[in-house]
Amino acid sequence: MTSLALWLLFFAAPTNAFAPLTVYDGNWLMKQGADKLTNHCHGYDAFYTCEQVLNGKPGALLVFVTTDKSGTYRSQVILPDGKPDGSSALTIDGNHWTFLSTDDAGKPNFRVENYFKDRDHIHYEQYKADAAGAWTKTGEGDEVRVP
């Protein structure tokens, strides 16, 4: 990569704690079902939000807040009727993102692993925990950014 390209990447990227989340903004084609997911994202001082629209219909509002540990966030899903639909912890480690949800007792019960191949390609895997804490893969797929 040329020094000019590195300079542009450095200065074009937001410098706040929500900068990694900006990759979600835009239109995504979910290859398995040919569903189109559009994320309208916006950062504020204390929150980062993404309104998710699936095939032209509002699906959910994701709200992210930072934690005291770099690369970790709390997220809350809000449905179009205003009701919450679960919260999770998000840990970002390079191109590997882990969303981990817990039950009311604080026991992990669901997780999503996102692997960013690059800014325009995501492979995801979904897992559910049984009562003993063993994880079973319940789904996987790929998303690609589209215009």
Image (cartoon, grey):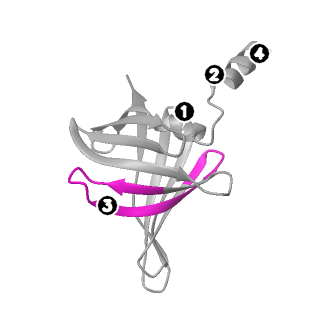
Q: Calculate the distance from the C-alpha at mark 2 to the C-alpha at mark 4.
A: 15 Å
Residue 50 placement, left or right of 119: left
Q: How crowded is mark 1: few (under 14 residues within 10 Å), some or many (20 or more)?
A: few
- Mark 1, secondary structure of its residue: loop
Instruction: Give the residue type at disc 2.
Output: Ala
Q: Earlier in the sequence, mark 1 or mark 3?
A: 3
Per the rendered image, the range of residues in magenta is: 75-97
Does 39 appear in magenta?
Answer: no
Residue in the image at 62% along x and 42% along y? 17
* Viewer-nearest of discs 2 and 4: 2
Classify residue 14 by image quadrant.
top right
Residue wearing tag 4: 2
Find residue 119 and name its label.
1
Find residue 58 and report its image quarter. Answer: top left
- Label located before the other in sequence (3 or 4): 4
Cα gap from disc 1 to disc 3, whole angstroms? 29 Å
